[in-house]
C-alpha cells in the first residue's frame, strides 16, 4: 500500500507532467523554464495492460537516423511505465512538436548500451546520478523512424518545406546553446553536430536534384532565383564540411557562421519558392 506522502508526490508529479505536455503541445514543442533549451519529445506507447495510448514527455538525444531516450524514472527502483509498454509493443509514435512520426523502439543491450550510456553521462552527468540511486541498469532505447512521407507533407509541399526549415532552425539553435555552454566538444555534442550536418546535406541534395529541376521545368522564370539558392547550397556545403572536421574551441564561431548563412538562405528560399508550391 502506498503511503499518503507517496500518493501525494505521485499526484504532484503527474500534474507537473500533464502541464508540461500541454505547454509542449500548445507551442509546437517549445517549453520554458528549466527546459527552455532542452530536447524534448512526446513518446506515445500502447499500454501493456490496457491497450490504450499512453503519452510521456522525455528528453532525447540525436543519434544519426534515430533518437535516444533513457528510462531513468528519476532513479526509481522500477522502470517507467512507458518502458514496460514498449517492451510489450515496440511500435510507438514520436512527436517532436513541429512534426510527429511512427517509430520502432529498440532497447540497446550489452556493450552498445554501456557505450551509449557513458556518452550520455558525459553530456549530462544527471544520468549518472540517477544510475547511482538504483540497482537496476537504466535502459537506453533507440527510437527508429519508420518509412513515411516527409514532415508536413499531408498539408502540401509548401507546408512540408516550412516544417523542415523550422526543424533545422530549432536544432541549430539547440546546438548553438550546447556549444556555448559545454566548454568541451564531447562525444554526444559531436554526434549532435554530425547529425544536423548529415540532415542538411540530404535536404539540400534532395532540393538540388529534385525540387529545383521540377520547379524550373514548370516555372522557367525562377532560373535566376534558383541559381542563387543553388550557389548558397554550395557555400553552406563548405561550412558543413568544415564543421564536421572541427574539434577545437573555434567551433562556436563556425556554428554561428553556419546559422547566419543558413537562416538567410532558408528565408530567401521560402520567400521565392513558397508561392509556387
Image (spheres, helix red, strand yellow):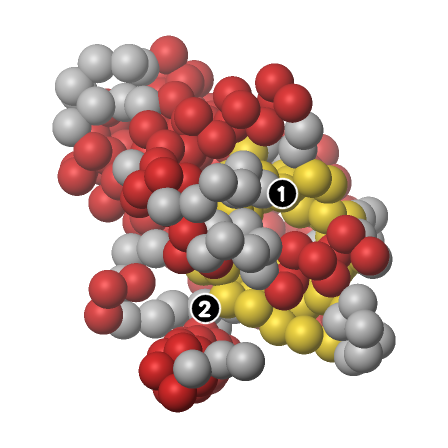
The quadrant of the rendering that contains the N terminus is bottom right
Q: Name the residue: 33% across, 28% down.
A: 122
Image quarter of residue 125: top left
Mark 1, secondary structure of its residue:
strand
Q: Looking at this rendering, what residue extends furthest in the front direction?
A: 1
Q: Nearer the viewer, residue 231 or 138?
A: 138
The image shows residue 271 at horizontal and vertical percentages of 46, 62
Q: Name the residue: 48% across, 40% down.
A: 135
Q: Earlier in the sequence, mark 2 or mark 1?
A: 2
For the residues marked 2 and 1, what is the alpha-carbon distance in whole angstroms?
Answer: 21 Å
The image shows residue 84 at horizontal and vertical percentages of 70, 58
Q: Identify the mark at residue 153; answer none if there is no mark.
A: none
Relative to residue 58, is residue 277 drawn left or right? Answer: right
Disc 2 target residue: 29
Q: Nearer the viewer, residue 36 or 87?
A: 87
Relative to residue 185, is residue 67 drawn left or right? Answer: right
Q: Name the residue: 63% across, 64% down.
A: 81
- Which is more foreground, mark 2 or mark 1? 1
Relative to residue 25, is residue 30 drawn left or right? Answer: left
How many numbered dots are placed on residues in this image? 2
Q: Nearer the viewer, residue 274 or 8?
A: 8
The image shows residue 33 at horizontal and vertical percentages of 23, 70
Q: Name the residue: 36% across, 39% down.
A: 132
Say if residue 272 shows up in the picture: no
Disc 1 target residue: 141
Say if residue 122 shows up in the picture: yes
Amino acid at each position: 500500500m502506498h503511503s499518503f506522502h507517496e500518493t501525494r508526490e505521485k499526484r504532484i508529479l503527474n500534474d507537473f507532467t500533464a502541464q508540461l505536455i500541454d505547454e509542449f503541445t500548445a507551442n509546437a514543442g517549445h517549453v520554458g523554464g528549466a527546459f527552455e533549451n532542452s530536447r524534448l519529445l512526446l513518446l506515445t506507447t500502447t499500454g501493456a495492460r490496457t491497450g490504450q495510448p499512453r503519452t510521456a514527455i522525455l528528453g532525447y538525444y540525436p543519434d544519426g537516423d534515430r533518437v535516444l531516450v533513457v528510462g531513468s524514472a528519476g532513479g526509481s527502483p522500477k522502470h517507467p511505465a512507458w518502458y514496460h509498454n514498449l517492451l510489450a509493443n515496440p511500435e510507438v509514435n514520436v512527436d517532436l512538436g513541429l512534426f510527429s512520426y511512427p517509430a520502432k523502439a529498440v532497447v540497446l543491450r550489452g556493450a552498445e548500451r554501456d557505450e551509449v550510456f557513458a556518452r550520455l553521462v558525459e553530456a549530462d552527468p544527471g544520468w549518472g546520478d540517477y544510475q547511482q540511486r538504483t540497482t537496476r541498469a537504466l535502459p537506453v532505447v533507440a527510437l527508429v523512424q519508420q518509412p513515411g512521407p516527409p514532415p508536413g507533407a499531408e498539408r502540401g509541399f509548401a507546408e512540408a518545406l516550412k516544417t523542415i526549415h523550422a526543424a533545422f532552425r530549432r536544432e541549430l539553435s539547440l546546438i548553438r546553446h550546447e556549444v556555448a555552454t559545454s566548454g568541451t566538444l564531447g562525444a554526444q555534442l559531436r554526434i549532435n553536430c554530425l547529425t544536423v550536418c548529415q540532415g542538411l546535406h540530404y535536404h539540400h541534395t534532395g532540393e538540388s536534384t529534385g525540387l529545383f529541376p521540377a520547379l524550373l521545368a514548370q516555372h522557367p522564370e525562377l532560373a535566376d532565383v534558383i541559381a542563387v539558392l543553388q550557389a548558397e547550397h554550395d557555400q553552406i556545403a563548405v561550412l558543413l564540411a568544415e564543421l564536421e572536421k572541427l574539434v577545437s574551441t573555434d567551433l562556436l564561431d563556425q556554428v554561428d557562421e553556419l546559422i547566419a548563412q543558413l537562416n538567410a538562405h532558408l528565408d530567401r528560399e521560402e520567400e521565392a519558392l513558397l508561392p509556387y508550391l
